Every structure is written in structure tokens, then in C-alpha cells.
Image: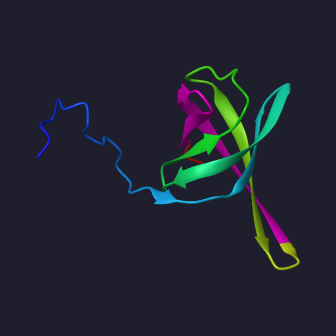
Amino acid sequence: MHSATSPNKDRRIARREAAVLEVYLRDEPLRCRGTTLDISRCGVSVNTKWKNFTVGTLIDLVFVQREGRVINLLRYTAIVVRHYDGGVGLRFCAS
């Protein structure tokens, strides 16, 4: 059992699910493409080569959902909560 101050304690309020989705990130004027690592109802981890993330910055996201010949684009706004070598952690903003 982890104590409240344990560094291994997962502080997320929503369960994460592994997911591999194509996603486009935009922080004008910069744009890049990435792939989700995992997603929850509160946020997403995205693997990307883009390294210019600043914690607290708002990012526009476009998820690409492909179902046969149909392509759906799902648009969200998120805030950068962490960045790491090879990716970024984002929290969805309330709409």
C-alpha cells in the first residue's frame, strides 16, 4: 500500500486506457503530429518528436478516428501538464 506522499502514488482521478491514436497538436504557429500512448476522460499522453512544450500552455488537439472508409476528426483543447523525452502529458480543458 502506498502512503499519500509515496512517489509511486498515481494521482490521476480517471483510469487510463492504453490507446494508439493518431493526433495532431497545434500551438500556433507550431504544429506537429503524434501518437497517443494512453488516454482517460481527463487527459492523454502523446508520443511526439516535438520538444518545445511549456507546462501551462494551451494546445489544440485533433484526434483522427478511422473506421473503414470513414474518417472522423475529434477536436479538443488541452493544457500541457508535463513533458518528457519523446512526448507530452496533456489535461483536457472543460468546454
- Give the quadrant of residue 84: top right
Q: Is residue 79 magenta?
A: yes
Residue in the picture at 14% in, 41% down: 2
Q: Residue 67 vs residue 56: left or right?
A: right
Q: Position of residue 95 (x, y in %)?
A: 60, 48
The furthest residue to the right? 69
- Give the quadrant of residue 26: top right
Residue in front for this viewpoint, 35 or 82: 35
- Give the quadrant of residue 89: top right
Q: Which residues are magenta?
A: 71-92
Q: Residue 27 vs residue 17: left or right?
A: right
Q: Position of residue 90 (x, y in %)?
A: 56, 38
The furthest residue to the bottom? 68
> Number of labelled discs?
0
Please say if 93 is above or below 73: above
Residue in the picture at 85% in, 25% down: 29
Q: Is residue 41 magenta?
A: no
